[in-house]
Amino acid sequence: MHLGRVIGRLVATHRYQGIDGVPLQLVQPLDGEGKESGGSLVACTVVPSGPGDTVHFIDGREAALACPE
């Protein structure tokens, strides 16, 4: 599990099958002190959040389990 801050929302004109209707957000990873760590990434959002919110995010197979399909 990683810590990050939502820095924006994205709109995709083409999506992978199974994530239709799942909102996409741009997330900036943070270190343990809340400072930026690495480049930003795109994340599927399964809980309500918006720009400026601090969030936890996961990657790998576990991340796919949170999506509807």
Image (tube, helix red, strand yellow):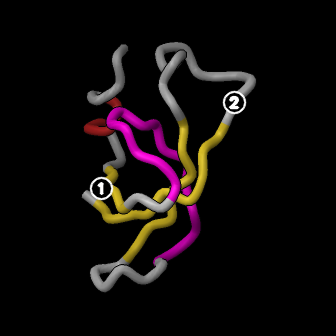
To which quarter of the image does residue 17 belong?
A: top right
Q: Amino acid at mark 2?
A: Ala
Give the class, few, some or many, for how many residues have Cα within 10 Å of label 1's Cα (few <14, many ≥20).
few
The residue at 34%/17% (across/down) is: 68
Q: Residue at coordinates 48% horizontally, 57% vertically from top-left?
A: 6
Locate residue 61, reporting x and y percent. Answer: 31, 36
The verdict on residue 46 being magenta is yes
| The C terminus lies in quadrant | top left
Tell which of 49 and 16 is nearer to you.
49
**Is residue 24 positioned above or below 37 on the image?**
above
State the residue at coordinates (32%, 65%): 3
Which residues, given as a range, are shown in magenta? 37-51
Q: Which residue is mark 1?
A: 56
Q: Which residue is mark 2?
A: 12
Sequence-first disc among 1 and 2: 2
Q: Secondary structure at mark 2?
A: loop
Q: Is residue 28 above or below residue 67?
A: below
